[in-house]
Image: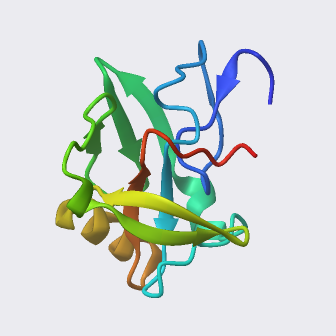
Amino acid sequence: MTISEFQPIYQCSAIAGPIRPAAQLRWLLLDEQSQALNTDDPLLKHVELAIRFDYLVIRAPGMLRLDIPVDVLEDDEEAFEEAQVKGRTLRVVSEGQLADAWFSKLLERPVRLVKLHPDESLEA
């Protein structure tokens, strides 16, 4: 990854543009057991990401566009849950049923899109 790229969703490709710290590795996809999906799913190669007007814009062939606000921070600690990523336990919050349904349809299996707690990081 170069200085002019960043990766909002852990399992998706990096996007060009100035690095947005609030969006760098902030989201990830989980399976039904709250385990992070592998990064090598071929269907995820078709996902296109962009940041527009403080939204993470997600597109894929045959799918409607999905917009997720970048800077919304969950302030209810009870909304957070645990997820397993690379042998680590991290706190995450769901991006909601619409995002889950979007990725589940794309990947043809139950998948959830979650956002990391502000104190957590995938970069260890």
**Residue 82 versus residue 56 in the image, above or below:** below
Q: Observer-nearest residue: 37 or 72?
A: 72
Q: Residue furthest right?
A: 2
Q: Residue 119, how many percent across, how many down? A: 49, 41
| Residue 72 left/right relative to 60 | left
Q: What number of labels is visible?
A: 0
Q: Nearer the viewer, residue 27 or 98?
A: 27
At x 31%, y 21%, the residue is: 54
Q: Residue furthest front?
A: 77
Q: Is residue 102 left or right of residue 13?
A: left
Colour pattern: rainbow
Camera-side residue: 18 or 60?
Answer: 18
Image location (x, y in percent) of residue 42: 66, 68
Q: Residue at x 47, y 78 (%)?
A: 34
Quadrant position of residue 123: top right
Quadrant (top left, top right, bottom left, bottom right) of the N terminus: top right
Q: Position of residue 103 (x, y in %)?
A: 38, 66
Q: Is residue 40 above or below residue 77?
A: below
Q: Is residue 45 left or right of residue 103?
A: right
Residue located at (52% from left, 20% from top): 20
- The residue at the point 45 percent across, 30 percent down is 50
Q: Is 123 above or below relative to 96?
A: above
